[in-house]
Amino acid sequence: MSAVLKPARSLRDRVSKEEWDVRVNLAAAYQLAAQFKWTDWIFTHFSARVPGPEHHFLINPFGLMFDEVTASSLVKVDHEGNIIEDPYGMGYNKAGFVIHGCIHQSRPEAQAVLHTHTRAGVAVSAQSEGLLPLSQHALRVINEVTYHGYEGVALDMDERTRLAADLGPTSRALILRNHGLLTLGTTVREAFEMMYYLECACQIQIDALAGGREHVKLIPPDVMEHGGKQFNRPGRESVGKDWDALLRLLERRGVQYRD
C-alpha cells in the first residue's frame, strides 16, 4: 500500500441516512481522538451500533491510523464477527471485536463504545486505588466507573462474559486494569464526553500524585455525590453544544472525515 491512502469510495448513497449519520459521527470521534493524542498507532478502537434490527456495528479497519478514518472507510460487522462491509479489505482487530462485540451485545442501549490506551489511562488502571476523587473532571465519571481485571490481550472469546459482568448493567465507564480505559453512551457524543472527562481525570491524577499520595486532598464523599448529580442534571445546557463545537474544530483544521 502506498504512503498516501486513496479515499474509500463513498458509501453515502448505499446506506441509510441513519447509518450515514452514525458513520460521520464515529469518524469524527476517531479524528478528534487523533487531535487529542489518545491514539496508540493502529491498536485501539471505537465502535458504533448501526441503526436497525440486524445488530451490526461499525469499527475501524485494522491498519488505519485514527487520522485516516473516514465515514466510508469504517468496517461493518455483525454480532458473530462476520464482515458485512470492508472498503479497504483490512479486516478488524480481533481484540476490538471481543471487547466491542461483547458490550454491544450485553448493553443494547449502547450506541457507541470507545477504548483507549493512553499513558495516563494505563497508569491509573495500574494503580491499586483506581480513579480517585481529586478533580472536578473526576466527578463527572467516578460514580459510574467499574473495573475489569487484566487477563492478557483480549483475544479469548470467553473473557466477554466476565467483561460484561464487570461493566455491569448501568456503568458508562470501565477501567481495564493494566490495560486502558473504556466508555460507552447512547450516542457517539455521550461516549466521547465520558472519555474526555475520564482521560482528563487520569491525567490530573498522575500529575497530582507525582508529589506523593500524602500531599493530595481528596474531594469529600458528600461533595463527590453532589457534583456527580450536578453533571447529570436533566437539561444540562452543554449537551449538544460541545459536540457541535468539536465538529467545528475539525472543520477549521481541514480534517476530511465526512467522506
Image (cartoon, rainbow, N blue to C red):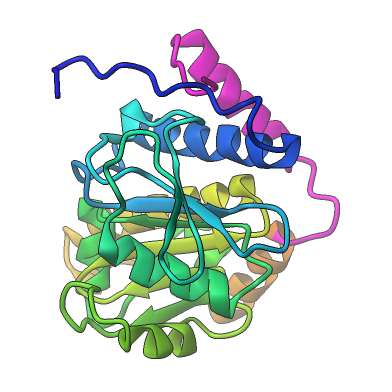
At x 31%, y 53%, the residue is 92
Q: Residue at x 52, y 22 (%)?
A: 10
x, y percent for residue 25: 59, 36
Q: Which quadrant would the N terminus be assigned to in this image?
A: top left
Q: From which residue to which does the magenta span run?
A: 232-259
Q: Position of residue 134 (x, y in %)?
A: 41, 64
- Residue in view at x 22 percent, y 81 percent: 150
Identify which residue is drawn at 55% across, 75% down: 105
96 sits to left or right of 24: left
Q: Would you say 176 lies left or right of 250 here?
A: left
* Total numbered labels: 0
Residue toward you, 58 or 135: 58
Most distant residue in the right direction:
235
On the image, the x and y values in percent for residue 28 come to: 51, 32
For residue 89, above or below residue 171: above
The foreground one among 61 and 172 is 61
Q: Is residue 47 above or below residue 139?
A: above
Q: Is residue 240 magenta?
A: yes
> Does residue 253 belong to the magenta stretch?
yes
Question: Vertically, is 202 above or below 72?
Answer: below
Image coordinates for residue 72, horizontal then vertical, percent:
49, 30
